Amino acid sequence: MPVFDHLGVSVADLRRGIDQFDAVLTALGFEKGGEHDDSAAWWKEGETEFIVFAAREPESGPHEHGRVGWQHLAFAVDSRDEVDRLHAVATDAGWSVVREPKLYPRFNERYYASFLEDDNGIRIEFMHNPPRDAE
């Protein structure tokens, strides 16, 4: 059982937020469990439920990376090819590229990742970091 039961994010434009997250979460094997007037949720057996909410104050502006609040959510995947695939899925769904897929030797010599942001400044990462003995 995951320690985190669910994770929720608020977006200014709910329809756009649902579309952007649906592309990514579906590509990761999640199923949309329901859509309501103010939210949508995705689930996958053994994983944390993910919920997108309509912001109560959408006019407050997008989140700014590095400020107090959301930093980023990293999705661990099985290969560099999967990082590349998911990066393409996200960009096709309208996510903005922060960093293209590449190695990050500052973390370790095996760490391969890409970083993207949605229209709300919500940042995600697709990463592959195999154990040292896996190579």
Image: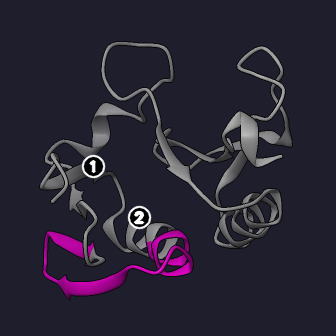
Image location of residue 115, percent across then percent down: 68, 41
Query: Residue at image x 24%, y 60%?
Result: 48
Q: In the shown orientation, is residue 13 left or right of residue 123?
A: left
Image quadrant in which you'd find residue 100: top right
Amino acid type assigned to the residue bearing label 1 in the image: Val
Quarter containing the N terminus? bottom left
Q: Residue at x 64, y 57 (%)?
A: 95
Camera-nearest residue between 66 and 104: 104
62 to the left or right of 90: left
Disc number lying in front (2 or 1): 1
In the rendered structure, the answer to whether residue 91 lies left or right of residue 9 reads: right
- Residue 131, x across and y down, in percent: 66, 40
Residue where numbered disc 1 is placed: 9
- Residue 30, how many percent across, how many down? 39, 79
Task: Depth check: give the residue in front, 107 or 101.
Answer: 107
Residue extending furthest toward the front: 133
What stretch of residues is rendered in magenta? 22-42
Q: Amino acid under label 2? A: Gly
Vertical relation: 92 (above or below) 121:
below
Write the residue at 67% across / 41% down.
129
Residue topped by disc 2? 17
Residue 66 - label: none
> In this orientation, which residue lies closer to the viewer: 81 or 36?
81
- Tell me the crowding category of disc 2: few under 14, some 14 to 19, or many 20 or more residues within 10 angstroms, Cα based: many
| Distance (Cα) linking label 2 and label 1 | 10 Å
Question: First in sequence: mark 2 or mark 1?
Answer: 1
| SS category of the residue bearing label 2 | helix
